[in-house]
Image: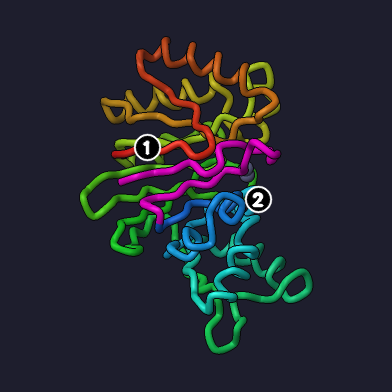
Amino acid sequence: MKITTLGAHNCESQNTRLTTLLVDDIIAIDAGSLTSSLSFPAQLRLKAILLTHQHYDHIRDVPTIAFNFAMAWSTLNVYSTIHVYQALSLILGNKLYPNFLEFPQENPSLNFNLIEPYQAVQIEGYDVLALPVSHSVPTVGYQVTSPEGKTVFYTGDTGPGLEDCWQRISPQLLITEVSAPDRFQELYQRRRHFTPNLLREELSSFRELKGYLPQVVVVHMNPELEEEIRAELAAVAQALGHAITPAHEGMQITL
Ligand SMILES: [Zn+2]
Ligand SMILES: [Zn+2]
């Protein structure tokens, strides 16, 4: 299983892209930087997009990739919860952009598939399990298991309180978020995001419950505060005796 972090940040600029993961070049998780990161042929190789939640930085490239699929007369499967479907329907409601859920009429470029939390499904040969996490709007993390049995869990945006989630998963790789350094902990805890210290507590609870820690990769960093975040993550890694890798755009992880 090959995972590429197309976007590793929560702010976009010339050098930083919004959070998006790519699994084996065919399944995207979140769509903050799909069209901005991938060539046309690479976009058309995509079979499915899993969306964690409706926040704009995670769904932004759904309309733009839908347009490209329409041009290629192809269909892309999108998977998420009813909340994300309702939010996407606002953008794809013919007012801001064509409704690619129904257009082109003979062959709509998006096919939306409803995901129910806690119910495992098969997507393109991968086992996918959506689990609620703790964010300011309804959000699910995804556990994706490849046909070879390699497993990644991506939390999406989340704050503390993932014990229930940890009980239900056994990933080799955990991709999660840290949005700001610890001096913003109070604010970011309220906004339901991690700081390095909050991540440390959740990883400790993971290890207590499961008896191990997976490989840990961090995305959704604020680029302006990244140096501070990286330094604090290094301290957390040392305290836990376990490596934590801050991601960057185009980073590849092989399981
Ligand atoms: Zn969010
Ligand atoms: Zn976000």
Asked whether, in this view, residue 67 is left or right of residue 209, the answer is right
Q: Is mark 1 within 8 Å of ligand 2?
A: no
What's the residue type where badge 1 is placed? Ile
Closer to the camera in the image, 238 or 108: 108
Give the structural element (helix, strand or loop) at label 2.
loop
The percent coordinates of residue 80 (x first, y second) are 51, 61
Taking the image as shown, residue 174 lies to the left or right of residue 49, namely left
Which residue ends up furthest to the bottom in the rendered image? Answer: 106
Image disc number at residue 55: 2
The amino acid type, in three-letter code, at marker 2 is His
84 in the magenta segment: no
Quadrant of the image containing the C terminus: top left
**Residue drawn where x is 52% and y is 33% of the image:** 248
Q: CA distance from mark 2 to mark 1?
A: 26 Å
Residue that label 1 marks: 253
Q: Is residue 24 magenta?
A: yes
Disc 1 packing (10 Å; few <14; some 14–19; many ≥20): some
Magenta highlight range? 1-25
Q: Quadrant of residue 153?
A: top left
Magenta residues, dominant SS class: loop
Whole-percent x, y for residue 138 in the image:
58, 51
Q: Position of residue 143 (x, y in %)?
A: 37, 48
